[in-house]
Image (spheres, helix red, strand yellow):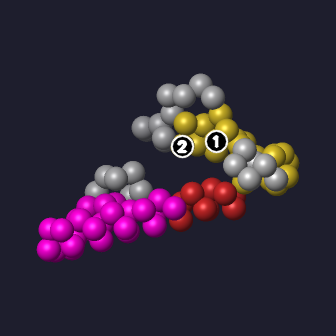
């Protein structure tokens, strides 16, 4: 089984490193990086929304430039790792 790029190591009551507020936070490990960060679910959701927003903006710009919507499938499709198309 292939290691995941991001992994939730554990959860605990603490401070989010993004909003600096007290929450239940997840300790997040990044594959190949020795440091781990802590993030609350609100900030993690906000980051996911930002990825989607930027991806849709990029896809729209490329589709307009190329004159077709095939790029949207390549950018937004798949399993979240950029692998595969729908």
In reply to whether residue 51 is colored magenta, the answer given is yes
Q: Please, is residue 69 above or below residue 62 in the view?
A: below
Q: Is residue 26 left or right of residue 13?
A: left
Magenta span dominant secondary structure: helix
Q: Which residues are magenta?
A: 50-78
Residue under the point 45% across and 65% down: 52
Q: What residue is shown at x 50% (from left), y 28% (from top)?
A: 32
Q: Quadrant of residue 71?
A: bottom left
Residue 86 falls within the magenta-colored stretch: no
Image location (x, y in percent) of residue 69: 21, 73
Q: Nearer the viewer, residue 33 or 7?
A: 33
Name the residue tied to disc 2. 6
Q: Image check: 76 left or right of 50? A: left
Asked which secondary structure carries label 1, the reply is strand
Q: Are marks 1 and 2 in contact (CB under 8 Å)?
A: yes
Where does the image place residue 38, in percent across and percent down from the top left?
Answer: 71, 43
The kind of secondary structure element at disc 2 is: strand
Disc assigned to residue 28: 1
């Amino acid at each position: 089984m292939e290691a995941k790029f991001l992994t939730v190591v554990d959860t605990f009551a603490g401070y989010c490193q993004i909003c600096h507020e007290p929450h239940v936070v997840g300790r997040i490990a990044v594959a190949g990086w020795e440091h781990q960060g802590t993030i609350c679910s609100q900030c993690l959701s906000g980051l996911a929304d930002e990825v989607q927003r930027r991806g849709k903006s990029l896809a729209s710009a490329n589709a307009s430039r190329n004159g077709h919507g095939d790029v949207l499938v390549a950018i937004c499709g798949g399993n979240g790792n950029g692998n595969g198309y729908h």
